[in-house]
């Protein structure tokens, strides 16, 4: 099955022996009765451990990423926490790309360093920087495109270098989604999603997911998913599965709208620079073309004027954190999503109060362009 057919039909065939539901029912039960004390009925015993609705979504998200196993969590950060708690020990070292979601940096720097896990940020857009690292590291962590500067990283080359050192590669695929990019195909070990974003797509469900192929890694992650307990609820599993079914259709419009807006902003006198991998002048455009089907709905730009007054004039771009919903959102990472980073680090990366990040929605492109034109 091709992508959209797969995410509609996989793990959701009608149960003709009972009701014949076309849509998988939401199983709200927290516990499951059995006839034998040694054998759970249908493999289900307690919803934290496994739930039929969550299992359906986990199977779908795995199929979407061309993976063998899927695991769903109560948030993207819960999924990240489970990776780190499951696979790293005291003394482990993580190499991460310098441009990361602020919550991920906070998790590394303010939480897991307390448990003896060290963390080093470098520029992974040039794989030679990873190759030059001396000593051992256990994990490489990256986003591509990255948040908020839309950096593009060569997943295949980074995976090759990391695996030579015996390290695992985790790719946060939230910006690209499985409709546009499949990191497992390029050698990554684990794919991470904040399903809150494009997977759900409607800004009404919080969640996270992991997809992988390795049996041993899956057993470790599955054990800690149950032991830590931060699992996706049955209702949020249903919402996430519903969103996944229209993901490719939505991403086509997100990408098309973002390309048009990038071209418009690039030529505007009040815009200093646009960060969007679909533009030929973007430093990562060649790699993005190799590993992405389209370039996604996220972009950032540097505004020459007074940022707050520009944002107040907008009508259709809501000033809000998060991304990936059908509606267009706009934000200033310096004050909002990346405010937890030390000011010196924000400035060093180029995340100042002139940088604006846009999650381009699926509204009519003419309305979005008019809104930006009026505000500029």
Image (tube, grey):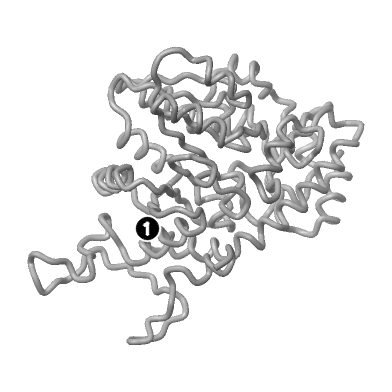
Q: Position of residue 116 (x, y in %)?
A: 31, 19
Residue at (58% x, 63% y) in the render: 3
Would you say 234 lies left or right of 203 here?
A: left
Mark 1 falls on what kind of element? loop
In this view, the residue in front, 221 or 371, is: 221
Quadrant location, the C terminus: top right
Task: Locate residue 300, reporting x and y percent.
Answer: 72, 35
Q: Residue at x 79, y 59 (%)?
A: 364
The foreground one among 2 and 205 is: 2
Can residue 330 be seen here? The reply is no
Is residue 258 in view from this perspective? Answer: yes
Numbered circles on residues, count? 1
Q: Is residue 19 above or below residue 50?
A: below
- The image shows residue 97 at horizontal and vertical percentages of 55, 26
Residue linked to disc 1: 233
- Whether residue 208 is situated above or below residue 102 in the rendered picture: below
Please name the residue shown 41% across and 14% down the image. Answer: 135
* 102 left or right, relative to 118: right
In which image quadrant can residue 355 be found? top right
Position of 231 with respect to 2 (left or right) is left
Quadrant for the N terminus in the image: bottom right
Residue 44 lies, in percent from the top left, at 23, 65
Seen in the picture, residue 142 relative to 289 is either above or below; the reply is above
Q: Check disc 1: other Cα within 10 Å, few if <14, some if 14-19, many if 20+.
A: many
Residue farthest left in this picture: 37
Q: On screen, 120 above or below 43? A: above
Q: Between residues 187 and 88, which one lies in front from this camera angle?
A: 187
């Amino acid at each position: 099955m091709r992508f959209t057919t797969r995410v509609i039909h996989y793990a959701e065939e009608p149960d003709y022996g009972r009701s014949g539901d076309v849509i998988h029912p939401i199983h709200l039960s927290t516990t499951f009765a059995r006839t034998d004390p040694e054998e759970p009925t249908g493999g289900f015993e307690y919803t934290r451990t496994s739930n039929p609705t969550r299992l359906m979504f986990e199977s779908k998200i795995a199929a979407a990423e061309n993976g063998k196993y899927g695991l769903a969590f109560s948030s993207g950060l819960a999924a990240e926490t489970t990776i780190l708690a499951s696979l790293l020990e005291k003394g482990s070292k993580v190499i991460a790309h310098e441009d990361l979601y602020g919550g991920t940096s906070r998790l590394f720097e303010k939480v897991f360093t307390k448990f003896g896990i060290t963390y080093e940020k470098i520029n992974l857009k040039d794989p030679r920087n990873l190759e030059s690292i001396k000593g051992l590291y256990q994990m490489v962590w990256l986003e591509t495109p990255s948040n908020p500067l839309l950096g593009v990283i060569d997943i295949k080359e980074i995976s090759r270098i990391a695996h030579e050192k015996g390290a695992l590669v985790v790719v946060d695929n939230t910006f690209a989604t499985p409709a546009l990019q499949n990191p497992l195909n390029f050698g990554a070990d684990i794919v991470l999603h904040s399903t809150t974003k494009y997977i759900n797509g409607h800004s009404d469900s919080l969640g996270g997911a992991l997809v992988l192929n390795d049996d041993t890694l899956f057993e470790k992650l599955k054990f800690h998913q149950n032991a830590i307990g931060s699992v996706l609820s049955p209702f949020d599993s249903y919402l996430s599965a519903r969103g996944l079914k229209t993901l490719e259709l939505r991403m086509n419009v997100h990408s098309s709208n973002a390309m048009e807006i990038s071209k418009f902003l690039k030529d505007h006198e009040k815009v200093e620079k646009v960060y969007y991998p679909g533009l030929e002048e973007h430093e990562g455009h060649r790699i993005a073309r190799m590993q992405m089907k389209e370039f996604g709905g996220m972009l950032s730009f540097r505004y020459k004027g007074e940022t707050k007054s520009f944002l107040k004039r907008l009508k259709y771009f809501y000033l809000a954190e998060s991304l990936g919903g059908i509606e267009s959102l706009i934000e200033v990472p310096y004050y909002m999503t990346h405010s937890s980073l030390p000011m010196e680090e924000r400035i060093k990366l180029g995340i100042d109060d002139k940088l604006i990040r846009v999650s381009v929605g699926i509204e009519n492109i003419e309305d979005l362009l008019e809104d930006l034109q009026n505000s500029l």
